[in-house]
Image: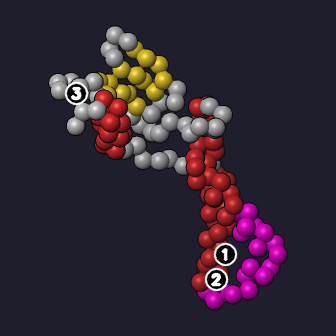
Amino acid sequence: MSTTSRLAGRSRCGSEGVIEEAPGKSHGIPVCVAGREPSPPDGCDGARVYAARRRDAVSWELTADMDTVVAVLRRVADGDDAVLANLETFSDFRDAVSGLRSREPFLAEVFLRAAINAALRQAFTTVQGTP
């Protein structure tokens, strides 16, 4: 997680959101107050590479792969059971499905602030021993 700390405001900014200490009876439990998308996973070669892969995941090649898969599925739905017996069609279909699967980790995920705050509450109450 790439974050920078702002000591005076007791908050951290990261690519995944802004985490601040909750006002009032927070007991030092941070809360996520803003965010847009998840941060890069470990082992992805950094935020810039992850962002580039996310852009590539929704490129025109995605559309071409989807068109290939849809064309084969339509033929199967129309009763052409031998469509995948053609080696070129089968190879194109296999490559398209593989391309679609390889994009899955880089497609946008939902940023669930409520779930993040619940996890922060649980983690900090467990650590601090408060109810």
Mark 1 neighbour density, 10 Å: few (under 14) some (14–19) many (20 or more): some
Residue at x 30%, y 29% (from the top left corner): 128
> Mark 1 vs mark 3: which is more N-terminal?
3
Q: CA distance from mark 2 to mark 3?
A: 58 Å
Q: Main secondary structure of the magenta part?
A: helix
Which residue is tagged 2? 76
Residue at x 77%, y 73% (from the top left corner): 89
Asked if one can make out residue 32 in the rendered structure from this viewpoint, the answer is no
Q: Nearer the viewer, residue 10 or 29?
A: 29
Which residue is tagged 1? 72
| Tag nearer the camera, 2 or 3 | 3
In the rendered image, residue 48, in percent from the top left (x then y), is placed at 61, 31
**Please, what secondary structure does the residue beneath circle 1 have?**
helix
In the displayed structure, 92 sits above or below 8; it is below
Stretch of the chain drawn in magenta = 78-96
Mark 3 neighbour density, 10 Å: few (under 14) some (14–19) many (20 or more): few
Q: Is residue 90 left or right of residue 37?
A: right
Q: Is residue 126 left or right of residue 108?
A: left
| Tag nearer the camera, 1 or 3 | 3
Q: CA distance from mark 2 to mark 1?
A: 6 Å
Which residue is tagged 3? 26
Asked if one can make out residue 125 in the rendered structure from this viewpoint, the answer is yes
Type of residue at label 1?
Val
Are discs 2 and 1 less than 8 Å apart at CB?
Answer: yes
**Please, what secondary structure does the residue beneath circle 3 have?**
loop
- The furthest residue to the left: 24
Q: Quadrant of the C terminus?
A: top left
Type of residue at label 2?
Val
